[in-house]
Amino acid sequence: MHGPAPMNPHPMAGFDRVCFLKPVITRPNIEVGEYTYYDDPDAPEEFENRNVLYHYDFTGDRLVIGRFCAIATGVTFIMNGANHALDGLSTYPFQIFGGGWEKSFEESSLDSGYKGDTIVGHDVWIGRGAVIMPGVRIGNGAIIAAHSVVARDVPDYAVVAGNPAELKKKRFDGATIAALSRIAWWDWPVEKISRHINALRAGDVRALQDGD
């Protein structure tokens, strides 16, 4: 048992709304791990164009999403290209309209709003319509509730909800989270993952620690 082919965009026969993202991503500034999927009844293959917004080459930021993530319909990643200069008297982007307004514009002035790369860990579930703001880091095993707006980092195995998203609880106790971080099952060969799916479903950490 070796699981579905990770480079098959539609691993569920007759159910094309579910799309593995890795084989359909073309932008060099987006990286998605194997088995991460996006669920959308309307062209999920267009994720990088419809769900990753304001992502321009000149900003230099990257979107990195780990393996085994589940991304629901309408999730949006806002990237650093959405930022306006913050260190002047006005945030209006005069320079983009030309007509002489672009003269003497210092691109470095945009740095005041730059938040860096957006990083999503492994085994993350992002609920329907959630918005991920620029530069956020979401830890492994986290759950983002539907329609949340995530404007700050999310710890490993946290459940967050709201606008702005706030910590509601941790999925497991500290010892279990530490053990899962050491095990890092998402990095295992798929054959080993396949042998331990029952333990993953059952929450049997000891079986993951002892298994080969």
Image (cartoon, grey):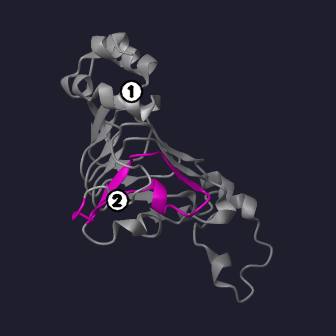
- Residue 197 image offset from top left, x and y in percent: 27, 29
Q: Residue furthest front?
A: 1
Q: Amino acid at mark 1?
A: Lys
| Gap in angstroms between the C-alphas marked 2 and 1 | 23 Å
Between 162 and 203, the one lying in front of the other is: 203
* Mark drawn on residue 79: none
Instruction: Confirm whether residue 173 shows in the render.
Output: no
Q: Is residue 18 magenta?
A: yes
Q: Amino acid at mark 2?
A: Cys
- Residue 133 image offset from top left, x and y in percent: 45, 52
Q: Which secondary structure, mark 2?
A: strand
Pointer 2: residues within 10 angstroms few (<14), some, or many (20+)?
many
Q: Is residue 166 left or right of residue 113?
A: left
- Residue 74 image offset from top left, x and y in percent: 30, 62
Residue located 42% across and 19% down the image: 183
Q: Is residue 184 magenta?
A: no
Residue located 26% across and 26% down the image: 200
Instruction: Confirm whether residue 193 shows in the render.
Output: yes
Pointer 1: residues within 10 angstroms few (<14), some, or many (20+)?
some
Please name the residue that numbered disc 2 is placed on. Answer: 19
Q: Is residue 130 left or right of residue 190?
A: left
Residue located 40% across and 26% down the image: 185
Q: Quadrant of residue 99?
A: bottom right
Residues in magenta?
13-40
- Residue 14 image offset from top left, x and y in percent: 21, 65
**Marker count (numbered):** 2
Please name the residue that numbered disc 1 is placed on. Answer: 192
